[in-house]
């Protein structure tokens, strides 16, 4: 019997991985050994997804074949009718429902020969899932997007096809692609470990990613900037909310990073380079909040995390704040699929932890 529970599984390792390496003390993140900033500055989304799944940067022939797998990700008509019935509400819950609905009659079984091809198809499906959830919420006609280049096909839903915006969005899809096994990937691993299927595992992950302590932070950090309103109001706001009321500063802190999250560099660079006059005050407010918060939190090793800046970029790309977490989720589909394939192909074991009983001793019913 162990001494006590490992609350939050903080010190528990549930798998080996060759996918993503994180050093929380030094602020290092590598995909298959390549530094995240090297990857985001040199590879496309498709090349990075291939690297994540296959472990190498693809040649043109490999990329063409992988792209055809992604191109298979068209939604059936019944899914459009289902999305049409969704009420106003949380896009992540819609995504979880759609992935579960796609799992109803899916024929994708676990097979070493087929897993990566199926993952490619599901990546294509996920671009259509999130694009059509966005179109539904905006009251627009649903359709299967052009998956020839899923990134620009997706960005068409916001009619925002300026080449520098497509490049920036592609960078965001790379930066969020994987992060070892956060809560959402762990939820997917638990599901996949029962030999349930990939789509059902993604459905589990969406429900976990939705939470405000995890993916929900991408939206809530941005809402903080709007609530503060101007750089001048940062200090009084911070003193009231964070110091006096001891509220959590969303977009700050991380279970693993005890220094700057290495993904911030690119998100900050892009959000500053794309910022126009109408968004200037939001960016200046965010930068002032980062400065004030760092002064206060640095000694507790609480630094900004990727969600602090990602919303600024998504806003500048024309997405509404209620969709930021969905964009994080869309990118993370690839990393989640890579982890559940790695687990089930190499060390599959039903994930079934224990609880330490501290309840009543045996008792008897006396009638
Ligand atoms: C993501 O895991 C991943 O990799 C996730 C992610 C990914 O790519 O998948 O990186 C994406 O989810 C990033 C995190 C986004 N979440 C937020 O921004 C929400 C705000 N952050 C915190 O709630 C918090 O930092 C967590 C939840 C992210 C991590 O917290 P831990 O490791 O559970 O630490 P804790 O809650 O035990 O806090 C330790 C101390 C506490 O103070 P004391 O009670 O000891 O005095 O630090 C304080 C906390 O109050 N603290 C904060 C804080 N984060 C920690 N205080 C104020 N604001 C914060 N943001």
Image: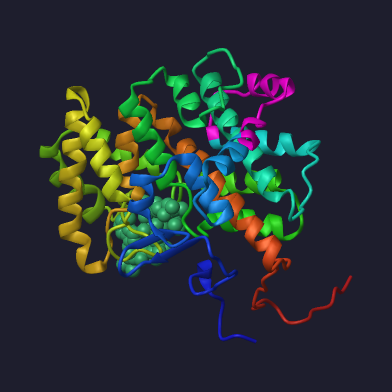
Farthest residue toward the left? 232
Quadrant in which the N terminus appears: bottom right
Please tell me how many numbered marks the rendered image carries: 0
Describe residue 76's horizontal placement relative to residue 240 as left or right. right
Q: Is residue 86 magenta?
A: yes
In the displayed structure image, the side of residue 260 where residue 235 appears, left or right = left
Q: Is residue 7 above or below residue 86?
A: below
Which residue appears at 71% of the width and 66% of the height?
A: 348
Residue pictured at 75% horizontal, 39% vertical? 103
- Is 189 part of what is drawn in magenta? no
For ligand 1, give the image quadrant: bottom left
Q: Is residue 228 visible?
A: no
Q: Position of residue 211 (x, y in %)?
A: 49, 47
Magenta-tinted stretch = 68-91
Query: Where is residue 170 shown, x and y percent of the image?
Result: 41, 36
Q: In this orientation, which residue lies closer to the viewer: 38 or 348?
A: 38
Q: Quadrant of residue 277?
A: top left
Residue at image point 15% right, 34% down: 230
Residue 38 visible in the displayed image: yes
x, y percent for residue 231: 13, 38
Vertically, is 310 above or below 80?
A: below
Q: Does residue 211 appear to the left or right of 195 in the view shown?
A: left
Q: Is residue 77 above or below residue 195?
A: above
Q: Position of residue 77 (x, y in %)?
A: 72, 20
């Amino acid at each position: 019997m162990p001494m006590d529970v490992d609350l939050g599984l903080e010190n528990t390792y549930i798998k080996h991985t060759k996918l993503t390496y994180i050093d929380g003390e030094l602020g290092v993140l590598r995909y298959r050994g390549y530094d995240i900033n090297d990857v985001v500055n040199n590879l496309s989304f498709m090349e990075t997804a291939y690297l994540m799944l296959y472990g190498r940067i693809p040649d043109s022939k490999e990329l063409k074949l992988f792209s055809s797998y992604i191109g298979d990700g068209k939604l059936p008509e019944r899914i459009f009718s289902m999305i049409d019935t969704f009420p106003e509400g949380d896009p992540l819950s819609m995504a979880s429902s759609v992935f579960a609905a796609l799992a109803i009659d899916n024929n994708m079984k676990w097979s070493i020969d087929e897993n990566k091809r199926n993952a490619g198809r599901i990546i294509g499906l996920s671009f259509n899932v999130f694009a059509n959830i966005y179109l539904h919420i905006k009251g627009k006609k649903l359709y299967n997007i052009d998956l020839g280049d899923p990134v620009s096909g997706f960005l068409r839903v916001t009619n925002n096809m300026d080449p520098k915006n497509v490049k920036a969005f592609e960078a965001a899809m790379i930066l969020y692609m994987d992060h070892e096994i956060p809560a959402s990937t762990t939820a997917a691993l638990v599901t996949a470990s029962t030999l349930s299927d990939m789509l059902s595992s993604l459905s589990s992950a969406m429900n976990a990613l939705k939470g405000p302590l995890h993916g929900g932070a991408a939206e809530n950090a941005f809402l903080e900037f709007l609530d503060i309103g101007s750089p001048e109001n940062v200090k009084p706001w911070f003193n009231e909310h964070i110091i006096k009321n001891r509220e959590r500063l969303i977009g700050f802190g991380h279970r693993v990073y005890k220094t700057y999250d290495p993904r911030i560099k690119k998100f900050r660079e892009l959000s500053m380079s794309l910022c126009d006059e109408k968004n200037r005050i939001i960016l200046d407010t965010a930068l002032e909040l980062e400065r004030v918060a760092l002064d206060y939190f640095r000694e507790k090793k609480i630094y900004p995390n990727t969600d602090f800046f990602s919303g600024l970029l998504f806003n500048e790309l024309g997405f509404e704040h209620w969709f930021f977490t969905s964009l994080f989720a869309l990118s993370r589909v690839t990393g989640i699929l890579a982890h559940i394939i790695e687990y089930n192909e190499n060390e599959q074991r039903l994930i079934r932890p224990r609880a330490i009983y501290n309840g009543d001793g045996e008792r008897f019913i006396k009638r």
